């Protein structure tokens, strides 16, 4: 394992980055996903939609509410083709 630490992956059920502690997907995670799915943006959006649903359910249990609009911004808006 490298000295650079864990990858930028989400810690459930908090949905914070295991590496940098930011709300996931953090900026490095977004960049990595865009690279990984650079030939298939649709698959990326499907994947993110699945994670957003999971995060929404888990965060709702933690907080008592999940702001759907915020989650859409956080999980999907940045990944849409422009
Ligand atoms: Zn991170």
Image (spheres, rainbow, N blue to C red):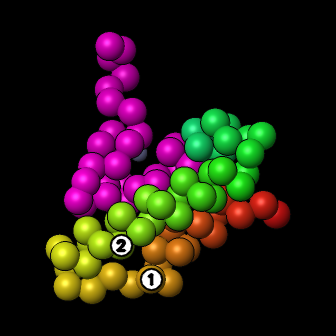
Q: Tell me: residue 9, above or below residue 4.
A: below
Label 1 sits on residue? 68
Q: Which residue sits at x=37%, y=23%?
A: 4
Mark 1 Cβ inside 8 Å of ligand 1 = no
Between the C-alphas of marks 1 and 2, the distance is: 7 Å
Is residue 12 rendered magenta in the image?
Answer: yes
| Residue located farthest toward the right when viewing the structure as drawn | 82
Magenta-drawn segment:
1-30
Task: Look at the magenta stretch and give its main secondary structure.
Answer: loop
Residue visible at 63% across and 69% down in the picture = 77
Quarter of the image where one finds residue 9: top left
Circles 1 and 2 in contact, beta carbons < 8 Å: yes
> Residue 3's spot in the image, x, y percent?
33, 17
Above or below: residue 53 compared with residue 33: below
User: Could you say whether the residue bearing mark 1 is in a helix, strand or loop?
Assistant: helix
Q: Is residue 21 visible?
A: no
**Horizontal arrangement in the rendering, residue 79 relative to residue 16 (left or right):** right
Across and down, in percent, residue 46 comes to 60, 58
Dot 2 crowding, Cα within 10 Å, few <14, some 14–19, many 20+: many
Q: Residue furthest top?
A: 1
The quadrant in which the N terminus is found is top left
Above or below 1: residue 43: below
Please give the name of the residue rendered at 82% of the width and 63% of the height, measured from the top-left corner.
82
Residue 73 image offset from top left, x and y in percent: 55, 74
Name the quarter showing ligand 1. Answer: top left
* Foreground pick, 23 / 81: 81
User: Measuring 32% from the left and 30% from the top, which residue is drawn there?
Assistant: 6
Q: Which residue is mark 2?
A: 56
Exactly how many numbered labels are in the figure? 2
Disc 2 under 8 Å from ligand 1? The reply is no
Element on which disc 2 rests: helix
Badge 1: residue crowd in 10 Å (few <14, some 14–19, many ≥20)? few
């Amino acid at each position: 394992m490298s000295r650079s630490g864990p990858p930028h992956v989400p810690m459930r059920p908090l949905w914070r980055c295991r590496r940098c502690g930011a709300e996931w997907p953090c900026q490095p995670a977004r960049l990595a996903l865009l690279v990984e799915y650079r030939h298939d943006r649709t698959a990326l959006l499907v994947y993110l939609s699945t994670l957003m649903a999971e995060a929404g359910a888990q965060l709702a249990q933690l907080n008592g509410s999940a702001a759907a609009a915020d989650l859409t911004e956080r999980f999907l808006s940045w990944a849409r083709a422009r």
